[in-house]
Image: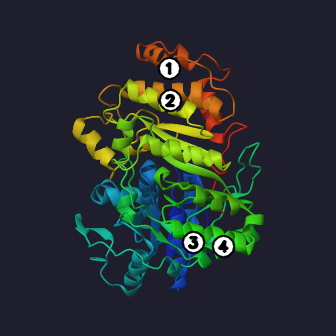
Amino acid sequence: MREKDYSKRVDLLLVNTPNIRGENEMRLGLLTIASYIRKNGFNCLILSGDEKEIKRQIEQMDLNNTIVGFTATTDVILVAYALCRFVKNLYPKALCVVGGSHPTALPKETLQESDFDMVVYGEGELTMLDIIKRYKEGGSLKNIPGTVIKLNDEIIFAPPRDLIEDLDVLGQPAFDLVRGGKSFGIAKSDLLKYKRVKRILVTRGCPFNCAFCASKLIWRRRLRWHSIDYILEQINFLIKTHNIDALGFFDDELICNKAKITELCEAFIKTGLVKKIKWECQGRVDRVEEEILLKMKEAGCRLMRFGIESGSPRSVAFLKQNTVKVEDSLRAIALCNKVDMLSFGSFIIGSPEEDLSDILQTIDFIENSGLSCAEVFIATPYPGTDLYAICREKGYLAENINWNDFLFKGGTKPLIRNKHFSGEQLKNICDYINLNVLYYLNQGRSIPKLDHRKEIEKILNGDLSPLRRGTKFKLKEHLRLGLKRPEKSYHLYLNVPVDF
């Protein structure tokens, strides 16, 4: 038995939960929690890596009378359960806490299904500080705002915590605490020669209410910005310490506050950051203006990401809650092309009422809109979303699924069916679009002229030849390439590791 390293005793141990494939992208929220905890006089450590590596590190510590905090989206919650059980078996006196989008959506179920003692729902920084103070003082952990606690098999809900008004009070993310993993990923591109790319968050929240998005559970549809000085300090730190040459703003929505995005762009230009890095961001198609795009381009922006979702007016109306039209998307892409900025579109098929005509309109949009690159997904009913509630009510959720099946880009089975298609049919249609449309678009090649209705009808009738014809790559190999991006794709940071 290895001797434990008691020098690693900490007030708060944070675990960056990996998925079942062992992939572990750093959740940026953990870095701000760690920063805020340290700013208030407590010490903190972050563990990252695959499940085996995290367990090995845990074995070398003394975690009795220590708070161990996990973060979990739906696709990693079962791994979080397993790691919590591992901690509890070794250190029965550890206090295990879990936060993130999944526990926020299903706090009671999370505690019932696991060995966790507490759930933190919503923003975690102020709540974790309160938990540490109470724990250190030996006080009751009941009724801490933003928590749900399990005591003697009773689950006790505390009231929600107010959102943080001044995000700068959190301090800069604790980049120094991240150990292991790849520091930089390579974005393969003939047009964007950037290899040292990082994602950052400079805002919190999104004011909109898309049917498939659970962002509102944590951020309550309020968009808040860090100050421009805070943002510049963070970027300059990453340039100095990690020699980055590109940034991916990971924010839900960066351009709907015209004054703020303009101020940020002007700061990039005035301080000379534009000469050091290039960047990309996400935005709403109905908020795109030529004036803003020109300012962003001047400041170093090279790609705009849009959640277009569908080329079908009916599907867009459902997914975007009647706030966006197909015409808005076409206009946004046209403006990007006009100012010579690359545009990426994300699409969803399989909405509850979507039929073949709707899907064909999406394919037509992808082929003819002028997008630089795109991806398509089957609608995923994450807990806490309107889509989840509708699919559960209508019986569209697949049978015998577990939370691991929600694994992003690689789940083991279809999660839903809809009014017109089985789950397997939706999966085959999505594969068809990837192989016969997106494979070519994302390499900058001409898309073959196919009768998509005829080809998809073959698939629906059990003939899977359209999934094999027209490429040397098997489907599995294509999807692997799709994750890493073909040589001529236009992505800055898609799936680039964010371990610092």
In space, the residues marked 2 and 1 are separated at their CA atoms by 8 Å
244 relative to 480 in the view: left or right: right
425 relative to 180 in the view: left or right: left
* 281 w.r.t. 361: above or below: below
Residue 303 shows in this picture: yes
Q: Give the mark, 1 or 4, whose residue is nearer the N terminus.
A: 4
Q: Secondary structure at mark 2?
A: helix
* 388 w.r.t. 233: above or below: above
Q: Give the mark, 4 or 2, whose residue is nearer the N terminus.
A: 4
Q: Mark 3, mark 2: which one is toward the viewer?
A: 2
Q: Could you tell me which quadrant the C terminus lies in?
A: bottom right
What colouring style does the render use? rainbow
Type of amino acid at the residue the image marks with label 1: His
Which residue does the numbered mark 2 point to in the structure image?
A: 363
Q: Position of residue 154 (x, y in %)?
A: 21, 65
Which residue does the numbered mark 4 point to in the structure image?
A: 267
Which residue does the numbered mark 1 point to in the structure image?
A: 452
Q: Secondary structure at mark 3?
A: strand
Q: Secondary structure at mark 4?
A: helix
